[in-house]
Image (cartoon, helix red, strand yellow):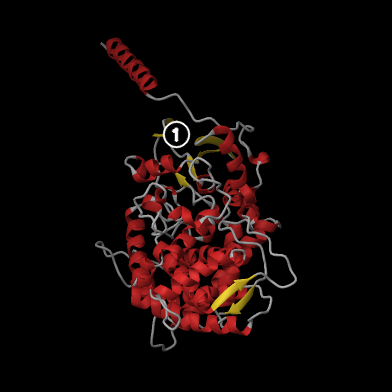
Amino acid sequence: MLEYVLCMAILTACICFAFQSFTRPTVEPPGPKGYPFFGVIFETDSKTLYKKLYEWTKQYGDIFQFQMLGKNFLSINSIDVLRDTFLQEPGATVSASRLPTFIGKYVLENYADLTFASPSLLWEKRRKCVHRLLHTYGEAKVSLENQVLQNLIHTKEMIRKTISKNVNPSEIVDEFILSTIEVLIIGRSFGKEGPLQPLLKLEHDLVNRLANPGSDALLSAAPFLRILPLPMSSVYRELKSIHQRFLDTLEMLSKEDCEKTGIYHTMKEALEERDENGKMWFTDKNISAVLVNITGAAYLTTRGTLLSAIHILAKRPELQKSLQREVDEVIGRGQEPKLSDQKNCPLMGAVVMETLRYISHVPVLILHATSQSTIIGGYYVEKDTVIVPNVWAMHHSEKYWDDPFSFKPERFLDREGQLLPATNPIRKRFAAFGLGKRSCIGEVFAKSRIFLFLSSLMQMATIAEPEGKPLPDLDPRNMVPGAALQPQEYDVRFLLR
């Protein structure tokens, strides 16, 4: 009897194995082979991984895989495949996980944040809470307009002081963005000489360097490097020190009497809440990590976009005239711009979208991971494979865009000069803020600030090339690398209209 049972068990196991082998796709994506364990690490520059991925896209196509430091990576270089993976089930759920990262574990309090943490019931609760806070303090029209327009008064004063002079616009842009972040967080701005802005700026310069996918992959594979006397290790240690100073300063400022409050105050109140089991669901670690998410996204991406737009417009006087004409007709010279004006300023909308496409300021979106084996683009992909959303390749593909390394806002306009609707196939090729469950929750906040800044600037000034110094065209391939690309330093002149 025992022999019969054993034989049946072996036969059943063989049938199951054969059936699994027969039904499981054996076709895996192509890609560079590299070396055992190390993979392709010796063929890439960690700071500019996206450039190497772009080269491989031309060789291997819409999807390819590679190995690096013991991990499998799948680069998705097609917007069609990305939309199918991130927007359609079961791929949308399977691909929504995050891989273990150095920055998530060691900077973001062991994944106590939103951006680098994998989905869970607790993560969903945090995300809903933060989305509500951003809506209350940042995306609600009256609140946002009052914040930004008040900050723009000071920004315009700074511009007037530089009229007709060669000036690096980064200081003007930095103070504008950091002031809006201060109001969002603490309810007021203390200015560039205050206690917060220098810490915010330094912190996110360091985050930008450390969160680069290539650097993070190396530190994730060998986290002990953080204690060695290496350049990237010193960046990590300085970042931890600066962030703690930032938190201490926020706590001190939050205890002062003030008429308005920000999301920091509201998150502190959430510390008193308990779940259905009476347990604390939001902690000081969540506050620390979420603040890195919000301030980093709000500063680095908006900064890169605005500075790129100013550079681009300085080289295109005719485009500026068209923008000024649109702003004059829709808003007027004596009126402050409103968010409701956006729908009547299609050229401005097209300029913003083309700037985001052209520079692809986050060339590789934050990496995803598969929570189980799946099929992507017709290929078999193993569980725990790292998904690389290669937006740089998608936004600069000749398959999707005519002359992709040329700046053409008209791509996003129809024959009547109106902005293409979100359902238009061309708009669907645009993925600057990600797609699906892990898309950027601050997209509306970022676009709104960019619109109000640029429309106000076009009302009062014309951007001209610097006197006595050449200003080359902005080439996104030469931008300063990081998690969010930044333009090289440059000068322009602001001329009053």
Question: Mark 1 sits on what residue?
Answer: 382
Residue name at image x 35 percent, y 72 percent: 340
Q: Is 357 placed left or right of 346 in the picture? A: right
Query: SS for tag 1?
Result: loop
Residue name at image x 56 percent, y 58 percent: 484
In the image, residue 354 sits, relative to residue 204, either above or below, namely above
Graded by Cα atoms within 10 Å as few (under 14), some (14 to 19) or many (20 or more), the crowding at tag 1 reads some
Q: Is 165 placed left or right of 441 in the picture? A: right
Q: Quadrant of the N terminus?
A: top left
Q: Is 289 placed left or right of 160 in the picture? A: left
Please indicate, yes or no, whether residue 198 appears anywhere in the rendered image: yes
- Front position in the image: 306 or 461: 461
Residue name at image x 41 percent, y 88 percent: 258
Residue name at image x 58 percent, y 50 percent: 405
Instruction: Pinpoint residue 281: horizontal percent, then vertical percent.
Output: 34, 63
In the image, residue 109 sits, relative to residue 248, either above or below, namely above
Total residue callouts: 1
Q: Quadrant of the C terminus?
A: bottom right
- Front position in the image: 279 or 369: 369
In the image, residue 277 sits, relative to residue 24, either above or below, namely below
- Front position in the image: 176 or 71: 176
Question: At label 1, which amino acid type do we have?
Answer: Glu
Instruction: Pinpoint residue 479: horizontal percent, then vertical percent.
Output: 63, 57
Instruction: Pinpoint residue 336: horizontal percent, then vertical percent.
Output: 42, 80
Instruction: Pinpoint residue 65: horizontal percent, then vertical percent.
Output: 53, 35
